[in-house]
Image (cartoon, grey):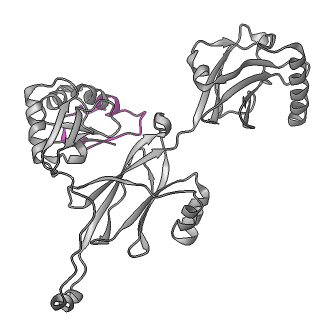
């Protein structure tokens, strides 16, 4: 999520996500006014950004550029790869801060950062100490309403195995109040564009667990719907509660809890096939990707797998295999529907890294010879796949 803030609005949790002025300007130029992105910039209307839809754009991005460079405004980008601060650490005692900059900034921005870091409320140790009431005050305390707290969840997102985040990821954020044995919060979110939960209230000192349930995890979704909790799914190892990594006080006084969440990003493989002439192109081509270390197999029919055939343009085809195993070796075979044509091994015994390392397109034509295979192996593959294709296409 992107948000423009003035220096006095920054919180401790914002500091490590402040984007360098140069990269912040690029991000704003890419997102602001674009019709081709689902991202948006909160509080953009309070800053001097160009207004689109008219014939003239007054002053362009010059004003916001100066504001970013001089510390009058900051872009909070929780996906930034170029934060202003290289390090930000609390010393023992929790009030003094050690910090360093990622790159050179002017004196105005440096002084503003120093002021902000000294001013913001520092994180406090987690947990609430509840002192037992004395016997004399017990009766009075029983008559007082319980003290309440406001909470909000913020998911710090990271792609599985360091892969880029997807454009969209729908989940159910479920917060269970374990002290009261009831639901504290449940909502459906596209966390890529909104990693925050709605605010919820508990009695002071109540403990809770936070679960993030992807929409694709249907058994856990059903468990929550039927039983009102995910205890059964958790006992079966289908899901586990997230671990809290920090907390701070939000601008409205609620407690903002940080949780790390690894977004499941399947391992996909895009391959480009091009042909030397139109006579070699056939809509009946079939591409079979085999995992050498398991029985995982995926087949892409050029004629009908529209979601996995990304490009069909002249002599070029781009196909995508989805949800590959994370480790192991792979073999790719191309077969024509006509059972008289021999299968072609595009590559065999190759790791994902080896496959994607060679970015140059290769010609996959029907007449190519099978690589690294003798005639007996060729005939065996041909006969096996002929039978399989004949039954499948039939």
Residue at the spot x=26%, y=30% of the render? 24
Q: Is residue 14 left or right of residue 200?
A: left
Residue at the spot x=58%, y=34% of the render? 267
Please tell me in which quadrant of the rendered image residue 35 appears.
top left
Q: Is residue 33 left or right of residue 299?
A: left
- Residues rendered magenta in the picture: 28-54
- Please tell me which residue lies in front, 117 or 39: 117
Give the number of marks.
Answer: 0
Q: Is residue 350 left or right of residue 16?
A: right
- Please tell me which residue lies in front, 138 or 35: 138
Q: Residue 191: x percent and y percent?
A: 42, 48
Q: Quadrant of the C terminus?
A: top right
Compared with 116, 140 (above or below) is below
Compared with 16, 387 (above or below) is above
Compared with 15, 354 (above or below) is above
Please tell me in which quadrant of the rendered image residue 104 appears.
top left
Q: Residue 144: x percent and y percent?
A: 21, 85
Q: Residue 262: x percent and y percent?
A: 46, 45
Compared with 18, 105 (above or below) is above
């Amino acid at each position: 999520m992107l948000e423009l803030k003035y220096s006095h609005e920054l919180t401790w949790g914002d500091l490590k996500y402040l984007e360098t002025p140069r990269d912040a300007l690029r991000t704003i130029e890419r997102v602001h006014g674009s019709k081709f992105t689902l991202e948006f910039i909160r509080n953009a209307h309070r800053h001097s950004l160009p207004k689109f839809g008219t014939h003239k754009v007054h002053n362009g991005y010059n004003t916001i550029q100066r504001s970013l460079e001089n510390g009058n405004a900051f872009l909070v980008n929780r996906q930034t790869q170029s934060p202003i601060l290289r390090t930000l650490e609390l010393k023992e005692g929790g009030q003094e801060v050690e910090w360093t900059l990622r790159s050179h900034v002017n004196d105005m921005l440096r002084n503003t950062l120093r002021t902000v870091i000294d001013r913001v409320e520092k994180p406090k140790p987690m947990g609430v100490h509840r002192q037992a009431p004395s016997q004399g005050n017990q009766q009075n305390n029983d008559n007082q309403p319980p003290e309440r707290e406001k909470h909000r969840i913020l998911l710090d997102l990271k792609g599985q195995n360091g892969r880029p985040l997807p454009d969209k990821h729908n989940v159910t954020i479920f917060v269970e109040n374990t002290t009261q044995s009831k639901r504290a919060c449940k909502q459906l979110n596209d966390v890529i564009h909104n990693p925050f939960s709605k605010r919820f209230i508990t009695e002071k000192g109540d403990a809770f667990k936070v679960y993030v349930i992807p929409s694709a995890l249907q058994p856990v979704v059903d468990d929550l719907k039927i039983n009102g909790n995910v205890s059964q799914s958790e006992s079966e190892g289908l899901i586990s509660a997230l671990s809290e990594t920090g907390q701070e006080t939000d601008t409205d006084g609620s407690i903002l809890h940080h949780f790390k969440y690894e977004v499941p990003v399947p391992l996909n493989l895009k391959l480009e096939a091009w042909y030397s002439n139109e006579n070699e192109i056939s809509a009946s081509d079939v591409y079979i990707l085999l995992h050498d270390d398991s029985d995982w197999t995926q087949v892409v029919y050029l004629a009908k797998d529209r979601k996995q055939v990304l490009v069909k343009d002249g002599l070029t085809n781009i196909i995508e295999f989805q949800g590959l195993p994370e480790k192991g070796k792979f073999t790719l075979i191309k077969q024509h529907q006509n059972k008289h044509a021999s299968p072609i091994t595009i590559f065999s015994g190759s790791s994902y890294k080896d496959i994607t390392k060679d970015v140059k397109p290769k010609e996959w034509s029907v007449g190519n010879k099978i690589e690294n295979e003798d005639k007996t192996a060729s005939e065996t593959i041909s006969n096996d796949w002929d039978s399989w294709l004949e039954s499948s296409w039939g």
